[in-house]
Amino acid sequence: MSRIAYVNGRYLPHRRASVHVEDRGFQFADAVYEVIAVRGGALIDEELHLKRLHRSLGELRIAAPMSDAALKSVIREVLRRNGVADGALYLQISRGAARRDFPFPPGIEPTLVVTAQRRRGPSTKQVEEGVGVVTLPDIRWRRPDIKSVALLPNLLGKQQAREAGAFEAWLVDRDGNVTEGTSSNAWIVTAAGEVVTRQADTSILNGVTRLGLIGLLAREGLTLVERPFSVAEAKTAREAFLTSSTNFILPVVTIDGAPIGNGYPGSVVRRLRQAYEGHVAAQGAA
Amino acid sequence: MSRIAYVNGRYLPHRRASVHVEDRGFQFADAVYEVIAVRGGALIDEELHLKRLHRSLGELRIAAPMSDAALKSVIREVLRRNGVADGALYLQISRGAARRDFPFPPGIEPTLVVTAQRRRGPSTKQVEEGVGVVTLPDIRWRRPDIKSVALLPNLLGKQQAREAGAFEAWLVDRDGNVTEGTSSNAWIVTAAGEVVTRQADTSILNGVTRLGLIGLLAREGLTLVERPFSVAEAKTAREAFLTSSTNFILPVVTIDGAPIGNGYPGSVVRRLRQAYEGHVAAQGAA
């Protein structure tokens, strides 16, 4: 838990860090966010996160609360005050607080909240033995490419997954194709050895780890194919895995209880995890 | 603007009324709400609002923060402290504040916020001359029957309507049928004089004004048909109107700029508005 949180210009003790009851983030989900992994004091792929943040803000026409340079200073100060060198940085920007009314209020100042956590990454067991996913209908709104806090369907899916003994839920569109997980992107490796993930259109969030991994595939001599894949194809894939900013890459070894391949993490996902850890370590050393 | 807001057991000056930055209402849209019209000191159809509140809470498995009797006391105290006899009561219940993580946190206490506004109802002009709507794709999640604060698509639709010079947006499903407005239910009157509104399945919010009006139709000698209707049917309807807790009943006289009927409020909607005002006045007098 963050000991100090940044809220609209002030560094506050965590328990006193608050936003107004008429903040549009609280009343309307009128807000966007980013979660950035921190390793060895470095913010992993910070520029990609800020780029995506600006895209989300632009799509919702929410003003940036400050320049990127100023935001980077705040982020670093929050990490410093919380003594977080390995964990996660959370930032949220809402349209601001105003008398409750649906349309964008004129002359409103955005709300910025920044917190930091010493977050456990995935367990060694999860990395080495893999995790299970269940499949659920994708009931989200049609713009999950915007990283908004309208996460109610996501958390309901995650809860359902956990109650089914799974780590994550993979969401399935009306055509029977997997879109993504509730807080991660979904990948498979085909019998031909191709690495497949859905193309980043408006149906998924374009994960920063997804982008980072795509950048590593060619170097690893692997072929990327961006296309939808069905639940049936995923269940008979050679390997499956998920990516997210806090978990990096995790093998998926069961889908709806059915084992993928021999039920153990395959060689491709193990190689990619190692390559991605190199990508992370290189930034920490910088 | 509410001068005094109730937040988790305390009556606070409005400007100091806040929730924690890790409230799940702020970070996840993990919250539900109700808006209740207040007229002549009476809470209009309060029991229907509380019944719907419990349904929303139950669907999301959020605990009620207190008994209905206690909640009614808080609601009345907020009205009293704000001197609101004509306006609107807003209440929001989130799952509570906890370290950010998607699944339901164990042992969490729900957050309750109650505010009151002296709200202008619709203008005389809007009531007498009607309003315009535009049609937009319904991009919301698939459970708008739950009155959650995941309202981002709703407010984007409302904003788009206002920028197009319209009062409201009617949302259209993949089959070309109107679901409802961004914050109101949608109705038409057919050439045969039937009053048509979409059936209350998971595709719409079952409005309290919708329910109240349904109760009045038979008394007015009008036939109700609950079924989907298309944009094309709406544009050639004899009359069209919308209902909401804060606007009661408003004639819709244009859809996407095209006039409905002769472009003036019809006889059915004028009769229904009058009947509904009687329904409201009866409660204020009680």
Image (tube, coloured by chain):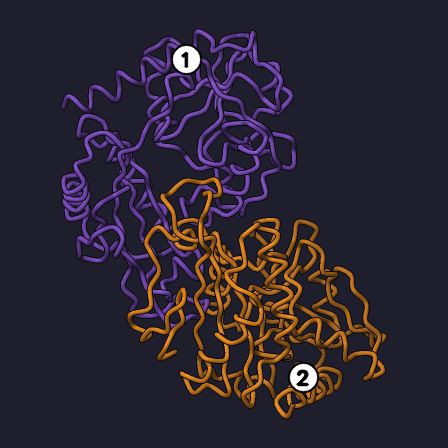
Chain colours: A orange, B purple
Q: Is residue A153 above or below residue B263?
A: below
Q: In front: A68, or A47?
A: A68
Disc 2 is placed on an element classified as loop
| Residue bearing the label numbered 2 | A265
Would you say A110 lies left or right of A210 here?
left
* Residue sitting nearer the eye, B232 or A67: A67
- Residue A25's x, y, as percent? 43, 55
Chain for numbered disc 2: A
The answer to whether residue B186 is above or below residue B97 is: above
Amino acid residing under circle 2: Pro
Quarter occupied by the N terminus of chain A? bottom left
Q: Is residue B33 above or below residue A243?
A: above
Quadrant assignment for the C terminus of chain A: bottom right
Residue at image point 32% right, 49% down: B92
Against B83, residue A227 (above or below) is: below
Pointer 1 residue: B128
Residue B237 is situated, as x and y percent measured from the top left of the image, at 57, 14
Q: Secondary structure at mark 1?
A: helix
